[in-house]
Image (cartoon, rainbow, N blue to C red):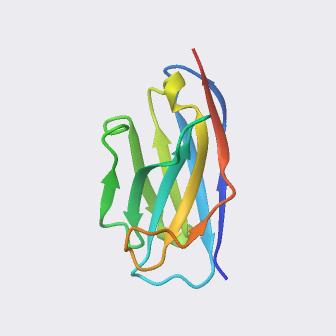
């Protein structure tokens, strides 16, 4: 059974930086990819970034390109979302996902972590 646990959310001010962590456990192969989605209040859940399990392939949505970055630590089975120059519109629940076959369809979701950016 795969488990994803997010951490690092909180309340910050516009212009601040914040880093989220996703710790993955369970049976995960090298074909997998880890992604981050976010759901702003009253809006749909959107894709933000993804990284292959070996860390060699990364995707970043245009909406956050230049401000957000994704990385991973192989030894810790963790994926990090570094968010810089945060804006009030970045306020959302952020979810970590695991796509076992990197087919663009997440198979597992974390519980989500709230990020609130005040103006």
Which residue is pictured at 51% across the width and 60% down the height? 79
Residue 88 to residue 1: above or below: above
Residue 84 to residue 2: above or below: above
Where's the C terminus, which quadrant?
Answer: top right
Which residue is pictured at 44% across the width and 69% down the height? 105
Q: Position of residue 97 (x, y in %)?
A: 54, 63
Q: Position of residue 77 (x, y in %)?
A: 55, 70
Quarter of the image for residue 102 reads bottom left
Q: Position of residue 50 (x, y in %)?
A: 40, 59
Quarter of the image for residue 64 reads top left
- Left or right: residue 17 versus residue 1 is left
Which residue is pictured at 43% across the width and 76% down the height? 32
Where's the N terminus, which quadrant?
Answer: bottom right
- Left or right: residue 76 versus residue 60 is right
Front residue of 40/82: it is: 40
Which residue is pictured at 49% across the width and 21% down the height? 15
Q: How many marks?
A: 0
Residue 113 to residue 89: above or below: below
- Left or right: residue 32 versus residue 21 is left
Front residue of 23/104: it is: 104
Q: Position of residue 42 (x, y in %)?
A: 60, 35
């Amino acid at each position: 059974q795969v488990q994803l646990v997010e951490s690092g959310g909180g309340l910050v001010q516009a212009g601040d930086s914040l880093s989220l962590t996703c710790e993955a456990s369970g049976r995960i192969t090298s074909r997998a990819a880890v992604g981050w989605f976010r759901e702003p209040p009253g809006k749909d859940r959107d894709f933000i970034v993804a990284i292959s399990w070996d860390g060699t392939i990364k995707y970043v949505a245009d909406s956050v390109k230049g401000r957000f970055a994704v990385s991973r630590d192989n030894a810790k089975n963790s994926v990090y979302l570094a968010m810089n120059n945060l804006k009030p519109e970045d306020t959302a629940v952020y979810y970590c996902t695991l796509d076992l076959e990197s087919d663009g369809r997440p198979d597992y979701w974390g519980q989500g972590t709230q990020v609130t950016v005040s103006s």
